[in-house]
Amino acid sequence: MKKTILITGAAGFLGSHLCDRFIKEGFKVLGMDNLITGDKKNIEHLFQLEDFEFYHHDVTKFVHVPGNVDYIMHFASPASPIDYLKIPIQTLKVGSLGTHNLLGLAKEKGARFMIASTSEIYGDPLVHPQKETYYGNVNTIGPRGVYDEAKRFQESITMAYHSFHGLDTRIARIFNTYGPRMRLNDGRVIPAFIGQALRGEDLTVFGDGMQTRSFCYVDDQVEGLYRLLMSDYTHPVNIGNPDEITILDFAQEIIKLTGTDQKIVFKELPKDDPLQREPDITLARELLGWEPKVSRAEGMKITYEYFKSLSKEELEKSEH
Ligand code: NAD
Ligand code: UDP
């Protein structure tokens, strides 16, 4: 008998890659999405498969699917600062009500349940690199609080279902991940810089560009998530690439990669933008035998080719 997995946020960037991976592993995949930040195009190639079903549904409303479900991966949520600032209440709801609904479904079906938590639960971290044992430094009432606190609540309610109902749960703390199928206009730094370079605009570095991030290629991320889901570890695990870079150096790398001679312009740093971020992945290495394999140079080349292949209209639409 084939195993069945329900993936929420299936039409988004990570969700669509997860659907591909589980189809490849021989699962029956139920993809659920309300398309608020995702795009059906990301999963259209799966629609003709017998083992794929799509549910156009908002998970903050009661969720039900017929038949057996062995695994649930709850990945629905706006993920880019621009998105969650535009739809703050929906962001809080999908992390809280949505997670509650899906935990209820997991309990009813006896399914293993995984959440897409985030490095944002560490806020603007005072500990570097970030280990799973660090409790974080989040401004609850700041603009990013709607995302960070929804994700922190999501971890708490997931742990409570594990402790009180014996639900089999997994918590992935995902660090900045990139690759094909990101939306050009989602405002995250990689599509933003590549879009600007392709349109011949200056690259907008926020603040002095000395803040750092550590970027993980999507195939590595999916491999880490797959191994965590199949493991028996129920506490949070960081999944990301520890190769840290300042945003200013990264802008320079993009200029080199795209072969353009764009200038860098400096814009105001958004409120509460974390100044440093790098995952400590010792736990993932030990538990899952996992570490990222794709270098930033390789991953960015593939990602650039993807964005270059998009039509001119899409590129113009992405201007903001
Ligand atoms: P994305 O915006 O591409 O995908 C999110 C998907 O969720 C979209 O298709 C959207 O339409 C859907 N969605 C949102 N609210 C919904 C609702 N109420 N009901 C049903 N569907 C809904 O973002 P992504 O980068 O693929 O992120 C996926 C998940 O991973 C998110 O939970 C995000 O918080 C988490 N995450 C991502 C990263 C990253 O770097 N990509 C880092 C940390 C955590
Ligand atoms: N950033 C930037 N210019 C942009 C978009 C983002 O300098 O046009 C910066 C942003 O301020 C942050 C970093 O790039 O310091 C990563 O931003 P992103 O939105 O990709 O992710 P997050 O802040 O959630 O890690």
Image: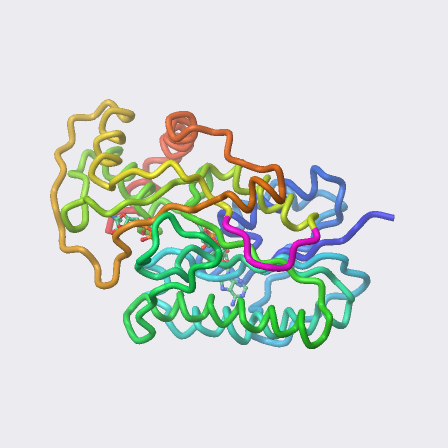
Left or right: 301 with respect to 251? right
Q: Is residue 16 above or below residue 34?
A: above
Provide residue 93's location: percent of width, then percent of height.
Answer: 48, 74
The residue shown at (63%, 76%) is 62
Vertical side of 123 occupied by 240: above or below: above
Q: Position of residue 92 (x, y in %)?
A: 44, 72
Count of picture labels:
0
Q: Say whether residue 9 is visible.
A: no
* Residue under the point 41% across and 33% down: 303
Q: Which residues are magenta?
A: 232-238
Residue 223 horizontal/vertical position (percent): 59, 39
234 drawn magenta: yes
Where residue 291 appears, as percent x and y from the top left, is 53, 36
Identify the colour scheme used: rainbow
Identity of the residue drawn at 71% across and 68% down: 167
Answer with the quarter of the image where residue 78 lies: bottom left
Closer to the camera in the image, 250 or 256: 250
